[in-house]
Image (cartoon, helix red, strand yellow):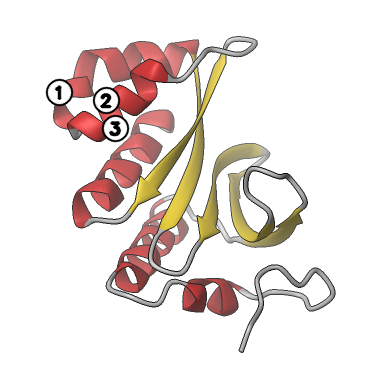
Amino acid sequence: MFDKMNSCLAATKENLIGVVQNENNARLKDVCSYIESGLNAQPQTSFSTCSGAPGWNLKYKKNSKAICTIYPEKNEFYVLITFNNATLEKFDIVSGNFSKYTQNLVKSTQLHNGTKWFMVKVDSGEAAQDVKKLIELKFS
């Protein structure tokens, strides 16, 4: 069995998707497919030693611009997304199209050097849809 905390064994996308072992596995596949087909981006596996989210993760970029980073867990996954001021202004206009969870998360995240970095916990279909809408907003 794959161990996402073992930095010595290189991870694959399939390994990381396999970490999520419940109905959120299909949601993770759906989010990855959305990014790969909609933005023509391929994932890169990366090992993080960050204390907040250690272990293997999937990073997506379009050209040199970060799309998101996905952190798989046993029964859920987290998606790190960054918004600059221009994207935050767009979000403010359409925030009513997002769940209360996502609205509160974006609002409560502190601005750091003109950017908000927020981790969306994906443990439901609603959260997965929000992630796709956030990514769409970032690249619109």
User: How far apart are labels 2 and 3 at the CA level?
Assistant: 4 Å
- In the rendered image of this protein, does residue 80 appear above or below residue 93? below
Give residue 96's mark: 1
Q: Nearer the viewer, mark 1 or mark 2?
A: 2
Farthest residue to the bottom: give it.
1
For residue 21, which quarter of the picture? bottom left
Give residue 117's mark: none
- In the rendered image of this protein, does residue 115 appear above or below residue 42? above
Question: Nearest the camera: 134 or 75?
Answer: 75
Q: Tag 2, which secondary structure?
A: helix
User: Position of 121 compared to 17: left or right?
Assistant: left
Residue type, numbered disc 3: Thr
| Location of the C terminus (image quadrant) | top left
User: How far apart are labels 1 and 2 at the CA level?
Assistant: 8 Å
Q: Tag 1, which secondary structure?
A: helix
Give residue 102's mark: 3
Residue at 28% x, 13% y: name it.
92
User: Position of 113 compared to 39: left or right?
Assistant: right
Residue type, numbered disc 1: Gly
Residue type, numbered disc 2: Gln
Residue at 15% x, 30% y: name it.
97
Question: Nearest the camera: 137 or 59?
Answer: 59
Residue at 29% x, 39% y: name it.
133
- In the rendered image of this protein, does residue 23 appear above or below residue 81? below
Whether residue 36 is visible here, answered yes or no, is: yes
| Mark nearer the N terminus (1 vs 3) | 1
Whole-percent x, y for residue 56 in the image: 67, 63
User: How far apart are labels 1 and 3 at the CA level?
Assistant: 10 Å
